[in-house]
Image (cartoon, rainbow, N blue to C red):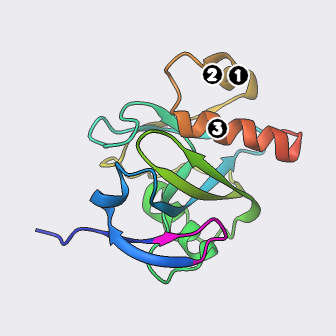
Amino acid sequence: MDPEEHLEIVNYKGEVIGYAPRSEIHGNPSLLHRVVHVLVFNPDGELLLQKRSQNKDVAPGKWDTSVGGHVGIGEDLLSSSMREMHEELGIAGHEPEYLYSYIHTNPYETELVTTFRCISGVEFPFNREEIDEIRFWSFEEIRGAIGKNILSDNFEHEFMTYLGQTGSII
């Protein structure tokens, strides 16, 4: 059996203040931890979303951010985003662009999210253990799905943050 993943506990500045197993961090919104998201757009400005596996403990079966994952202990944010892009979608050789950071909280967890952007029009050999399906969505389709229990609460927050920060499609 694999040992349980441990994560850094951080303050609101992103400074490491401790460590804990994932099982303690998830389920305790007082333990802030770092995650990275990568928004993958195609050249037409559509956003790739992933439908999370039914086996996931967070938002199973919901459409979610293109790429998302925990920052490893001692890992920098760019390296973490590139690792997650490769692990989840098979994307290698693309260095994503930093966009912004924000806090996402719900009754289950609190995350310090750092978001990057990547433009790619290739086929993605996605990780079928973590992801049930992927597809590109127009912004109109995303807006139509908000609040209808189709998208993860985290992605809805991400999408509204993206629109507020950039004011544009890509």
Residue position for label 2: 146
The answer for how far apart the CA atoms under marks 3 and 2 are is 10 Å
Q: Secondary structure at mark 3?
A: helix
Q: Check disc 3 and give the amino acid type.
A: His
| Label placed on residue 60 | none
Q: Secondary structure at mark 1?
A: helix
Q: Secondary structure at mark 2?
A: loop
The answer for how far apart the CA atoms under marks 1 and 2 are is 5 Å
Residue position for label 1: 143
Span highlighted in magenta in the image: 9-15
12 in the magenta segment: yes
Q: Residue at x 28, y 58 (%)?
A: 23
Check contact, mark 1 vs mark 2: CB within 8 A: yes
Q: Check disc 1 and give the amino acid type.
A: Arg
| Label placed on residue 157 | 3
Q: Residue at x 45, y 56 (%)?
A: 88
